Amino acid sequence: MLDIKLTNGTIIDGTGSAAYKGDIGITGDKITCLGCLDDTEAKTTVDVTGHTVCPGFIDIHTHSDTVLLADGSAQSQIRQGVTFEVCGQCGVSIAPYENVENMRQYSPLPLLTPVDWDSFGSYLDCMDRQALGLNVASMVGHGALRINCMASPQGTASNDEITAMEAMLDQCLEQGALGLSFGLEYEPGFSSATEELERLCAVVAKHKGIAAMHSRDRARYYDTGIDEAIALARNTGVTMQVSHINPKYGRPDNGMQRILDAVLNARKEGINVYMDVMGVNLNHTNIAAILPTWATEGSPQDAIKRLKDPVLRQKIKVELKPVWQIVREEKWDKVWLLNAAGSPDLVGLSFTEISEKLGRPALDCAFDIMINEGERLRSALWTSRSFSYDDVAVALQDPECPCISDGFAMASEGLLSQLPCSLHTFDWVPLFLDEFVTKRRTLTIEEAIRRLTSVPARRVDISDRGMIKPGYHADIAIFETERFKPCATFANPRTYPKGMVHVLCNGEFVMKNGERQPANPGRVIRR
């Protein structure tokens, strides 16, 4: 007897094959049979007539490291059908750390739980003890290695310091990290030399892990970023995943096409380089990312003192890092304040509007907003229309390019309801489907589902999830095809999408009839 039988659904199995009508049988945490199951008994039968039934979505680029320890229910992900995510991205992970204060300084979100781990393995053990609504795996962040092993993380690593990083990385991979992530547009990764990256990638290759790279530049010098990623993959044999490939404002019009050509040509030569993309046109980051390295050295209070000093403030203005060309060109009407606990009345306004309201130049307003954040200086976020849907469509021409969120597993209620998050944390999946299936017709629905399921599973080497197939884990999303739409806005970003009906994780309903269930059957997946 089956535990669960899903009947009469329109099945999109994650392989890219055409949708078909059928039933799905589940026993324990696995899919056991497909087809017409009229004569097969089940403890629970759910009629899903008229609904799309597909594998649970797999998000291989998130920053949920801290929030899942505080609230593992993963509401924002579950309510859009996500059943697996990979955190520890962009060089930022909360393990391993020997110095908790250093971790607090570089973490993008506040630590909401006691820190009772030091190694990567003990961090995964802590996550394992949490009640999780979805499955979780993690990368180890390059920034964490630098903070642990270097006297000055914002500088050039010595040979001995790189050797220490290699040893720590080796240990993290032995303890279950999927691979290593780089955040080269931000400190402390920004200061690293390519030689350092190459030595670390060689360690990852030895373990047959993954290297995920947030490249140094995605605007005017976008080509140097992709060339570095390809060279590292070629020279070390590592499998390189170039994170959120979306080129930003300031890149040439043919920038994404040139990136696509470079990646596809490299793969033809046998170099294991891949990419993923955000299906959005809004780019968000912390405001502090524009500050030159010297301005952020030391504690947040040290940075605030420099921002308050008129002479140093002027020097900072001259030496801004090239994270956002749109800021360098002062296109303030295209930049909005996304989060700032110390300036809540300004959130949602463009920096043109903020400048007019405060009667100060927009860049000075940005500096003042960071000052108002105090110790959480890095939590002040802004967003801009630096990305292009046209570029996303070009990236999707690569059949191995999945869509990712670059977000957090958040909630509109409880402990997480006041924390900063990106605008599309709550609706990145329906937004992707709406824009690139319904509106642009870039992908068929079957191909779009493949980019959210079996393709990302393959990119992180997960062999038994991402398809509707006997023997695979019963991670399943069931939604109303026409009603599954994004609902978040600037005014109300924490709005769950409509149309998701049922979600199963490891054979248990975590969402049923549109309501989040008490079950939290998610697991920590180790490499």
Image (cartoon, rainbow, N blue to C red):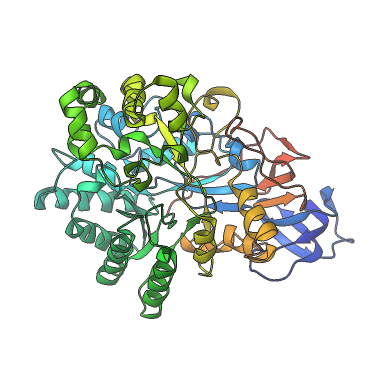
Quadrant where the N terminus sits is: bottom right
Q: Residue at x 37, y 78 (%)?
A: 270
Farthest residue to the left: give it.
159
Q: Relative to 71, is 149 above or below?
A: below
Q: Nearer the viewer, residue 234 or 257?
A: 257
Q: Relative to 395, is 172 above or below?
A: above
Q: Nearer the viewer, residue 362 or 113?
A: 362
> In the image, 307: left or right of 84?
left
Farthest residue to the right: give it.
39
Confirm whether residue 340 shows in the render.
no
Q: Nearer the viewer, residue 204 or 253?
A: 253
Confirm whether residue 191 shows in the render.
yes
Q: Residue at x 50, y 55 (%)?
A: 388
Q: Which quarter of the figure has residue 315?
A: top left
Quadrant where the C terminus sits is: bottom left
Q: Position of residue 510 (x, y in %)?
A: 68, 40
Q: Residue at x 57, y 34 (%)?
A: 490
> In the image, 267: left or right of 196?
right
Q: Position of residue 153 (x, y in %)?
A: 19, 40
Farthest residue to the bottom: give it.
269
Q: Position of residue 44 (x, y in %)?
A: 82, 46
Q: Residue at x 65, y 61 (%)?
A: 440
Total number of numbered discs in the rendering: 0
